[in-house]
Image (tube, helix red, strand yellow):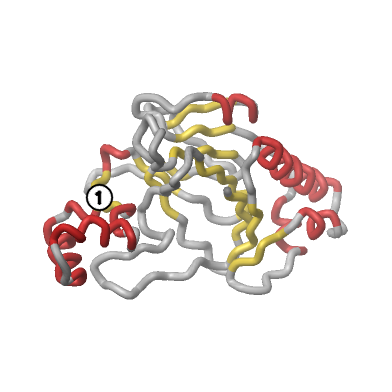
Amino acid sequence: MNNTFSPNKQIGVVSTFSELVHTDFKGEMNALCWYRNLDGDFKEIVNQLSLKENITEVFPKDLIALQVSEKGNIARETILNDLQLLTDFGASPSLNLLKCYERDDEFDFIATDVYSWHVDRSPIATDTFLCTYHGAASDIVPNSEAEQKIAIPEIRAKLKELHNGPEEEFEDFLKENYFDLHYQLHENAQPINLGQMHLWRLAVDHPKQQVQPCIHRAPKENEGEYRLLLIC
C-alpha cells in the first residue's frame, strides 16, 4: 500500500530531503511531502521487532541486529538513512513500533489525545516530521475545513463550567490543558491520508511561524496490525 493524493494548495511535494527541510511554508501550504515509492519489505521489519508496551521505541542497534532478507535490508537501510538525515539536520527522530496510543476519555465533549484532530505547538521554531513505514497512516485536513473546538459555543460553555474560575484566567486554562489545540471538522471536510513511506514535514504553531499550523490526527489502527512510525 502506498497511498497517492492529488496536489493541492495545502501540500507541497518535493523529491529530496534537502528540498523537504529548506522549502518555506507559505500561503495555505503548511505540509510538505517527500514523495517516495520504496522497494523495501517493511512488514518483515515489523514482524521481527518485539512490542514491549503499547508503544515501543526502536533504536538503530535494534534494526541492525535483525536477520532480514534482501528486501528487508532495503527497508532497514531506508529507515536508518532517514534517522541519520534528520539527526544530521538537528532533529531528534524517534522510531516507534506501536499498537495504540493512550485514549483521553476524561470528558465526553472534548478529547485531547492524538486521535483527535489537533495541531502541534512549540515554544521554539520547529516542525513535525513523520513517516509511516507500515500500518495505518496519519491524516491531515485543510485549515479552512475545520474550526477550533473552543470556538464552538456549546463546547466553550462546558469548558467554562469546568474551569469555574476568574474570567481573565480562562484563556490560560484552555492553553494549559491543550484544549485550544483541538479541532472539529466541518461536515464537508475532506481529510487527506498521508500514506506509507513518504516523509512529511508539518507546520507547527510557534512564535515565528508564518502559516497556520497543520491540523492532523493519528489513525485508528488496523485490527491485528502494528504501525511503524518515525516521528520528531
Q: Is residue 165 left or right of residue 54?
A: left
Residue at 35% from the left image edge and 29% from the top image edge: 28
Q: Position of residue 224 (x, y in %)?
A: 58, 69
Q: Is residue 67 left or right of residue 101?
A: right
- Callout 1: 10 Å neighbours few (<14), some, many (20+)? some
Q: Is residue 39 among the parts visible in the rendering? A: no
Q: Nearer the viewer, residue 138 or 206?
A: 206
Q: Pointer 1: what residue? A: 148
Residue at 64% from the left image edge and 61% from the top image edge: 97
Q: Is residue 141 among the parts visible in the rendering? A: yes
Residue 107: quarter of image: bottom left
Tell me if residue 126 comes above or below residue 56 in the rendering.
above
Amino acid type indicated by mark 1: Gln
Q: Position of residue 153 (x, y in %)?
A: 12, 57
Tell me if residue 154 comes above or below residue 20 in the rendering.
below
At mark 1, the secondary structure is: strand
